[in-house]
Image: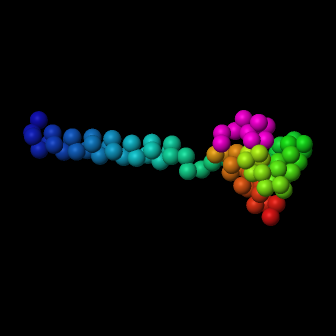
Amino acid sequence: MHPLTKLLVIIAIAALVFWLLTKVRESTRGDRVSFRPVEDLPLDVQQSIDHALAHDKKVTAIKLYRQATKAPLDAAKAAIDVREWKRG
């Protein structure tokens, strides 16, 4: 194989690997947090969370949400932030 052809093949393979790695990183970056809305939880859990938020105990509300859903911290915080925003 001609040396110039080899160089072009190597550059093409490197570009393909770079493109693939970029796509994998984008798909696993985790910019979006999915969570179950507080409104979908049992009424007693909703009331407990609302009570905690009414008394400025956001950490407690997050803990209650996590106990009820087994959600990771970032999802629980997002759900409580949305609940707090909806409550005004």
* Whole-percent x, y for residue 36 in the image: 74, 45
Q: Nearer the viewer, residue 68 or 62?
A: 62
State which quarter of the image contains the C terminus. bottom right
Highlighted magenta segment, given as a residue range: 63-73
The residue at the point 74 percent across, 41 percent down is: 63
Asked if residue 35 can be seen in this view, the reply is no
Q: Would residue 44 appear left or right of 79 to someone viewing this image?
A: right
Specify whether residue 56 is painted magenta: no
Scheme of colours in the image: rainbow
Across and down, in percent, residue 1 comes to 11, 35
Q: Residue at x 65, y 42 (%)?
A: 73
Q: How many marks?
A: 0
Farthest residue, direction bottom: 88
Q: Is residue 56 above or below residue 62?
A: below
Question: Is 68 contained in the magenta span?
Answer: yes
* Left or right placement of residue 50 versus residue 23 in this view: right
Among all residues in the image, which is located at the extreme left?
Answer: 2
Q: Which residue is at a point 40% across and 46% down the rendered structure image?
A: 22
| Image x and y of residue 11, in percent | 22, 45
Q: Where residue 85 appears, x then y in whole percent?
A: 75, 61
Choose between 56 and 24: the one closer to the eye: 56
Tell which of 26 and 3 is nearer to you.
26
Horizontally, is 5 left or right of 18 in the view?
left
At 68% from the left edge and 49% from the top edge, which residue is drawn? 77
Main SS of residues in magenta: helix
Q: Quadrant of residue 84?
A: bottom right
Residue 66 visible somewhere in the drawing: yes
Q: Nearer the viewer, residue 25 or 53?
A: 53
